[in-house]
Image (tube, rainbow, N blue to C red):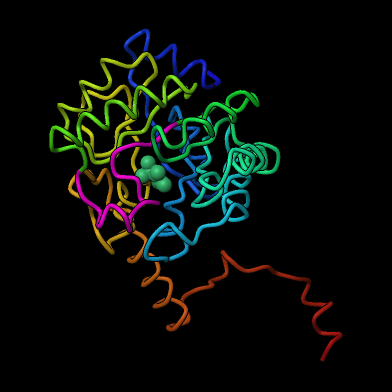
């Protein structure tokens, strides 16, 4: 079934959970799509897990288009959501619409995601008015790492929880079709989910959200620079890859690869003419 911003809303109304994963390339996105994942987020986490940056701040619109278009080519059914990178929408409503438009026209996004609450409500409204579905993102918002002071759980005090709830309502009111909640106490995420008509997609926000998203390298054990508490490892692909790379290297060095089965033959008579 083709997933869209509209079907995401349907899922919430029917009480059906929404599954999302990040992807940044054609082959991985194709596997996820074939596996029936509802939504694929081309997250600006690509700065960390694909490009090796310490944070997401250096990621550009061009990076997102490049990886987003690759993902979109591999997807038939999942909703492709592309992150708007740092300073591609905070600067003005004009920049927000223009860059969201590029992510759709050049990156083939079905929706875009941006971080923030009331302070970006005008941008969410304008992008939505340009017929581009917007997913909000609250809680731990990595593009604000310098003002947040670190990667930690958000909304734990009464004032912070109240602000998070008000921001969530503002994001919905501005026209967002869904909201990512990152690193938020489970009970608070559940409360916010109950107050919103749009689906919440949690990452480190407990089981009360309408859906879940994880960075795929985390859930496959392919990235160990750091592992947040909320990450569940569904397979040890990193170990499988390392073993395969080591075995390949061993076979190349001892001459057992390539063997005949993996080489091309030719007519011996043609070969003789060359001596
Ligand atoms: O960039 C990303 O991967 C994200 C998820 C962590 C939600 O925004």
Looking at this view, is 273 or 258 the one in front? 258
- Work out which quarter of the rendered image holds the C terminus and state it: bottom right
* Location of residue 96 by image quarter: top right
Residue 42 is covered by the magenta coloring: no
Q: Quadrant of ligand 1?
A: top left
Q: In this view, does 129 lie to the left or right of 43?
A: right
Residue 144 is covered by the magenta coloring: yes
Q: Is residue 89 visible?
A: yes
* Location of residue 22 by image quarter: top left
Looking at this view, is 268 or 11 the one in front? 11
Looking at this view, is 70 or 208 the one in front? 208
Q: Is residue 223 left or right of residue 85?
A: left
The count of marks equals 0
Q: Which residue is depicted at the point 23% across and 45% down?
A: 231
**Which residue extends farthest right?**
273
Figure check: 21 above or below 177? below
Task: State the image coordinates of residue 229 (x, y, percent, origin top left).
Answer: 17, 48
Figure check: 191 above or below 40? above
Q: Which residue is depicted at the point 20% across and 20% down?
A: 191
Q: Which residue is depicted at the point 29% across and 54% down?
A: 221
Figure check: 273 above or below 246? below
Looking at this view, is 214 or 57 the one in front? 57
**Which residue extends farthest bottom?**
275
Task: State the image coordinates of residue 2 (x, y, percent, origin top left).
Answer: 55, 20
Task: State the image coordinates of residue 36 (x, y, percent, origin top left).
Answer: 44, 28
* Location of residue 93 by image quarter: top right
Figure check: 223 above or below 29? below
Task: State the image coordinates of residue 148 (x, y, percent, origin top left).
Answer: 27, 52
Q: Is residue 26 visible?
A: no
Chain part drawn in magenta:
136-153
């Amino acid at each position: 079934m083709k997933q869209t911003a509209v079907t995401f809303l349907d899922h919430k109304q029917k009480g059906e959970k929404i599954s999302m994963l990040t992807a940044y390339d054609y082959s991985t996105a194709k596997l996820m799509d074939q596996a029936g994942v509802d939504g694929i987020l081309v997250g600006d986490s690509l700065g960390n897990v694909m490009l090796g940056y310490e944070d997401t701040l250096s990621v550009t619109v061009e990076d997102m288009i490049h990886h987003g278009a690759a993902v979109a080519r591999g997807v038939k059914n999942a909703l492709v959501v592309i992150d708007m990178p740092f300073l591609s929408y905070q600067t003005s409503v004009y920049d927000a619409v223009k860059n969201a438009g590029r992510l759709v026209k050049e990156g083939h996004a079905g929706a875009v995601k941006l971080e923030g609450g009331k302070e970006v409500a005008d941008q969410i409204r304008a992008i939505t008015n340009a017929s581009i579905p917007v997913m909000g993102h609250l809680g731990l918002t990595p593009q604000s790492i310098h003002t947040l002071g670190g990667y930690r759980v958000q909304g734990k005090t009464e004032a912070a929880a109240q602000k998070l709830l008000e921001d969530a309502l503002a994001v919905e009111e501005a026209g967002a079709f869904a909201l990512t909640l990152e690193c938020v106490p489970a009970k608070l995420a559940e409360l916010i989910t109950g107050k919103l008509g749009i689906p919440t997609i949690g990452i480190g926000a407990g089981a009360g959200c309408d859906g879940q998203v994880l960075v795929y390298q985390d859930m496959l054990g392919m990235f160990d620079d750091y592992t947040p508490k909320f990450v569940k490892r569904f397979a040890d692909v990193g170990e499988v890859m390392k073993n395969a790379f080591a075995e390949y290297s061993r076979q190349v060095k001892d001459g057992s690869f390539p063997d005949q089965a993996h080489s091309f033959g030719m007519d011996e008579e043609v070969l003789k003419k060359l001596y």
